[in-house]
Each structure stands twice: as structure tokens, then as C-alpha cells.
Amino acid sequence: MEFNLLHFFALLSLAFVASHAAQSSADYWRSILPNTPVPESISELLRSPAEWMDDKSTTVAVGEGNVGVNTGSSGGPGTNVQVGKGSGVEVSTGTPGEETDVGVGKNGVVVKSGNKGKPVYIGITTGPSPFDYNYAASAAQLHDDPNVALFFLEKDLHQGTSMNLHFVKSTTTTTFLPRNVADSIPFSSDKLPEIFDRFSVKQNTVESEIIKNTLSECERPSIKGEEKYCATSLENMIDFTTSKLGKKVIAVSTVVEKRRVMQRFRVIGLKKLGKKAVICHKQNYAYAVFYCHKTNHVKAYTVSLVGNDGTKAKAAAICHTDTSSWNPKHLAFQALNVKPGSAPICHFLPEDHIVWVPY
């Protein structure tokens, strides 16, 4: 997903100026959570706009009907973005020949990772998040092989279990805005025209559908036993979490040691984190937004895994012990062939999602 890049850079520049006039997000974290380390998945979202604007690493070229962006040294690892009139958005990141390609067109998003021409994951769409338990999955969202889903039964969460997994990060590289900047931008379905105008987004495009879907998910009523909140800044995420769990909390995310490919992983270790948690899922949006929810009847774990190629991962996992309030057509029920409330259902968190637990 890409919005008008020049408008977004201007917004980042505004955020940079504002951050010098107010406490930074990182400073706020340290003031509220002095004993809680910042996970890498969060620190990656705290890059200053100066890094985006650095002339040594980023170039922006605007031509008739096209925008081109390149980050990184010439011929080395970097990111290339091409926005054209008819072709949508093309993104290539990484060393030439070993890059990840992302294409955004009329039909959603397609991601190809690895050697050029050899896709290992296809099918990210503009549809609802699988972590919104109120929605019914369409047939297109159910992968042909249910083993690739991040969902699994709690009875299968033990040492020695193996499953096909593909840990992925969001295809967007959006970062947090300072709270005072984020709070000044409308975040409501009834303000869609103003939001579209702010980011130069046209109606009936992939970008407009992404915005509408994210706002819709944030505004949808909570399921029974759930308290939900969409945090448009890191400060707001911290405030929601500490209001539910207190200030003695840790933030855990999935960490994979090297390049991410679909493969068989085996559970080699398991650690319980507790039965109280706030889970925050990164959303597709023009800047970093997290859908956070405190849900009753959960168990949080960190799971040590090793892949067939030796790749090690420490994954954050959440098990829902009562799914009776979920939509009966949710992706998890279809993939696992179980009914609501019949069995505890677990899922791993993608790398850029967070689970908060008290200590």
C-alpha cells in the first residue's frame, strides 16, 4: 500500500518539527515504562522523518504520471518504489536478485519474496484482518492448504509439534506519528473525504478501500468479553495498555532470525506468559495504527521454533480458550474445521504485532 508519497513525506516532516516541540514517543515510553525494554518491532516504527528525508539514502523523482523512490546505496540493498498511472504501485526491496517485490493493483496486493520470479507467498488482500473475530472470511481468504494459517489448536501446542509456517511483516513501512500530530488527523468513517484529501487518495481505489476497511474494523462493536481500541500513536497504545494491565508490563513480539520463507517449523520450547494480555495488531494505513484488544479467556506464550533449514524463531502466541462469541464463519473455524466454543484456538503473531503482559 502506498499513498501519495510527496504528501506523506510532507506529513513526516511536520511530525519531525512537532516532535521537537513535544516529548518524543520514545521519551514517553521511558517515562511511563522505565523498566520495559522496547521490542525491535516497535523501535523500527520510531524512525525519525529525517531518516526518510536523508538525501544520501533517499531520492524522489516525479515525472508525468509516475513517482519513483529509491532508498539505499546504488547497486546495493535498498528499496525502489514506482507509482504509475496504469500499473498501480511496484515496490522492490533488498539486494538485486534477492529482493522482495510488492505490487499493488486493482485486485489487492501481491507479494513475491526471494529470488526474482519465485514467489513464496501470494494473496494479501484489502479484506478484513483475520485477528478481527467478528468478521466472516470469504472463500478467497481461505488458503488451499489450511496448514499455512497462523491458527492452530491448543492441543497441538507442545514440544515436538511441527507445522508449516510463514512469518511475515506488514508490507507497509509506515511509522508512528507523534501523538499531537496523529490526534490532529481525522480518524473516522464520517471523515473519509477529508482523510482522502489529506493523502491525495481517490475514491474506488485500492488505497481508499484499505483506509475504509481499517476504519470499519476499528469502529465495529467489540465481541463479548473484549475491550478494543485503535491506537493511532505509540503514546495512545501505551495509555490503553497500562489502563488495562497497569504499568508493570512487558511487550513481546515474534522474532525470526533470518530471511522469511514458508517451511516446516518444529516446537523446541514453550514458556507461559500468563492469562492477562493486551494484543495489538498493526493495521494497513497511511501511518502506524494498531488495533489493540484486551480479551478475556486467553493464554499468552512465547514459543521457540526451528525450521527445516535451521532458521530459529521465538514466536509470540495467543490461545483463546473461549471462542463462542466469534463469527461462526471466521477463518480459524474454516481452516481448523471446528465450531465456535468447541476447542481452544491459538495463533502466532506476525513480527510487527505486539502482546503486552503484566510481570
Image (spheres, rainbow, N blue to C red):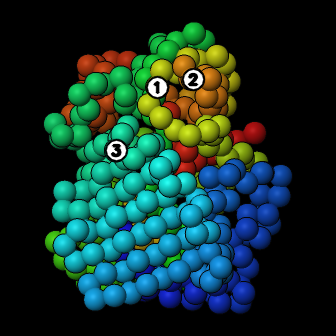
Name the residue at 50% across, 88% down: 10
Query: SS of the residue at dot 2?
Result: loop
Q: Amino acid at mark 3?
A: Gly
Name the residue at 58% across, 59% down: 77
Circle nearer the N terminus (3, 1): 3
Would residue 87 be visible to someone looking at this image?
yes
In-front residue for pair 223/34: 34
Would residue 228 be visible to someone looking at this image?
no
On the image, numbered disc 3 is attached to which residue? 117
How crowded pointer 2 is (Cα within 10 Å; few <14, some 14-19, many 20+) is rated as few
Q: Splitting the image into 4 quarters, where does residue 343 fall?
A: top left
Name the residue at 30% across, 25% down: 146
Q: Which mark is residue 309?
A: 2
Horizontal and vertical percent position of residue 7: 43, 86
Q: CA distance from mark 2 to mark 1?
A: 8 Å
Circle nearer the N terminus (2, 3): 3
In-front residue for pair 110/84: 84
On the image, numbered disc 1 is attached to which residue? 263
